[in-house]
Image (spheres, rainbow, N blue to C red):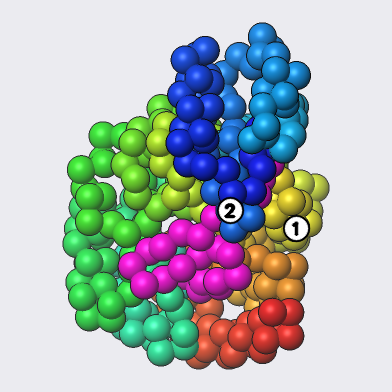
Amino acid sequence: MIVVLKPHVEQERENQLIEWLKSIGLGVHVSTGEYQTVLGLIGDTSRVDTSLIESLDIVENVTRVTEPFKCVNRKFHPEDTVISVGDVKIGGGNFCMIAGPCSVENEDQIVNVAKAVKASGANMLRGGAFKPRTSPYDFQGLHAEGIRLLKIAREVTGLPIVTEIMNVEDLPLFEDVDVLQVGARNTQNFDLLKELGHTGKPILLKRGIAGTLKELLMSAEYIVASGNENVILCERGIRTYSDYLRNTLDLSAVPMLHELTHLPVLVDPSHATGIARIVPPMAMAATAAGADGLMIEVHNDPPRALCDGPQSLRPEEFDKLAGKVRAIREVIA
């Protein structure tokens, strides 16, 4: 249920209403916009007398929300959420480029790629330290050493770092990581999501391999309901009947998610397509569709990459793509 207050309500009267709502067992999510304040009521609202609340002279209207996701619902929070990662802002008209290799392999590799993508306009550096792989015999990442190398790359370039967390037990290793990524395979690891909700850190949440938009939003709800509103959604392709691409990039998810939620929405065309030459057109299409940013895999030597070389752009290819993305942004802004 949402309660929309009239403009210019005295803070004391707003606080009194909030305290009364809490006293009857409801959680209250307050969203203060430029022109109005929205109170999102969480809990068993079936027993709430809407006519009583509507009769209050500080209340504009009361609406019941039928969707199962509440905290991440745009009805609860009409204005876009803007997430800050250092000096980088994501959402609300701010566009973010995250780039880097699928896996951190060694210091020279991650530092050189970081320098290259920063020169091309990337805002953040991605790199996998823990790698969930389909085969147990594939490279699984450098783990703690990979995070240490990412920090070195951050020191050299100043780029905030993004890397994937797979287990709750590994959280202490991620204390100095700027953005924690939840990969497609862990989108419904609810114990992990709840624990990330206690961190306060920005969380980049990827859509599941065959996940619906509602399931993605419910996963985000776990994090936000646990106290962490710094969630970035990421469309990374879903498994369909496509037989030539790794996955199918659902670009319609971008405007649909913007309609359903206030959270920023990024697109990862690298994992969606699995083919380097298909990444640029899909990245440009995602930009035109209104994505709040892109996540692109970039490797200095893709044929020798230990992970996902076929979908990785070379630094010069990323540079060319970044220029085209900026041009599209100028047109649609």
Image coordinates for residue 217, horizontal then vertical, percent: 62, 39
Q: Name the residue under label 2.
A: 33
Q: In this view, does 106 lie to the left or right of 236?
A: left
Position of the C terminus, as image quadrant, is bottom right
Residue type of the residue flagged with mark 1 = Pro
Is residue 300 depicted above or below 173 in this figure?
Answer: below
Count of picture labels: 2
- Magenta region, residue range: 73-98
Q: Name the residue under label 1.
A: 255
User: In this view of the protein, which residue sits in the foreground, 86 or 300?
Assistant: 86
Would you identify the image quadrant in which residue 119 lies? bottom left
Identify the residue at horizontal 26%, vertical 41% (top origin): 171
Image coordinates for residue 213, horizontal then vertical, percent: 69, 42
Which secondary structure lies at badge 1? helix
Would you identify the image quadrant in which residue 155 lies? bottom left
Mark 2 vs mark 1: give the one in front.
Answer: 2
Identify the residue at horizontal 66%, vertical 43% (top origin): 6
Task: Examine the rendering and report whether any part of residue 264 can be seen.
Answer: yes
Q: Is residue 85 left or right of residue 303?
A: left
Q: Does the magenta stretch include residue 109?
A: no
Image coordinates for residue 1, horizontal then vertical, percent: 67, 27
